Amino acid sequence: AHTSFSSQAPGKERTLIVVKPDGVQRRLVGRIIQRFEQRGFKMVGLKMLQVSEDLLSNHYRQLRMKPFYSDLVQYMTSGPVVVMAWEGHQVIQSSRNMVGQTNPAEAQAGTVRGDFSLHVSRNVVHASDSPEGALRELQLWFRGQELLDWECIDESITCEDD
Ligand code: GDP
Ligand code: MG
């Protein structure tokens, strides 16, 4: 039953967004949520947790050979994170644009990283980078029952059926 993690239905794409420990420490969670809400996306999952090294090493398994990997693990496990699933029309690509470049020095103003961060090692937020990545990461961070299907009253106004 993959349906709660991803859907072929137009406008029902889902992605994983994580407010990293620096974002939680700096009390940026509300402002980050607000940006996704105001864009028109729908929250379908939300929780706060302390990440285990197991989960994190799976999440970032493509980066294991990078020189910064041990710093990354230390950073991501240094305190609680807030994990969110967001749904909507092309949410995966749009949320990457909203989050901005990996290195905040290259992130445009108006993006989360471009507005709230300075250094690549403390870039406030994670966003899945592809449909395959989003599916894998949603399954890794959430149980199926933690993701909700619900109808938002403005959906027929913000998005025409494709
Ligand atoms: P993202 O998809 O934009 O988050 O970037 P990547 O998937 O390439 O890297 C994952 C995360 O690793 C980034 O968001 C950073 O937190 C961290 N990271 C990436 N590159 C560097 C680096 O050069 N130095 C350090 N310290 N951390 C990095
Ligand atoms: Mg990435």
Image: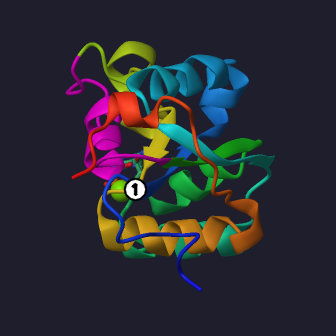
Q: Give the residue at x 47% y 61%.
A: 69
Please say if 12 is above or below 23. below
Tell me: 155 left or right of 151.
Answer: left
The amino acid on which the numbered mark 1 sits, given as a three-letter code, is: Ser
| Ligand 2 neighbours mark 1 (CB distance < 8 Å) | yes
- Disc 1: which residue: 128
Q: Give the residue at x 69% y 29%.
A: 24
Q: Which residues are magenta?
A: 87-108
- Number of on-image labels: 1
* Label 1 crowd bin: few (<14), some (14–19), many (20+), radius 10 Å: many
Looking at the rendering, in which quadrant would you find the N terminus?
A: bottom right
On the question of residue 102 being in view, the answer is: no
Question: Which residue is outermost to the bottom?
Answer: 1
Quadrant in the rendering for residue 104: top left
Please say which color scheme the image uses.
Answer: rainbow
Q: Nearer the viewer, residue 122 or 13?
A: 13
Tell me: 139 left or right of 97.
Answer: right
Residue 43 lies in the magenta-colored region: no
Tell me: 41 left or right of 20.
Answer: left
How far from the left and from the top, in percent, is residue 41?
45, 36
Label 1 element class: loop
Q: Give the residue at x 55% y 76%.
A: 58
How far from the left and from the top, in percent, is residue 22?
62, 30
Tell me: 95 left or right of 28.
Answer: left
Q: Nearer the viewer, residue 75 or 93?
A: 93
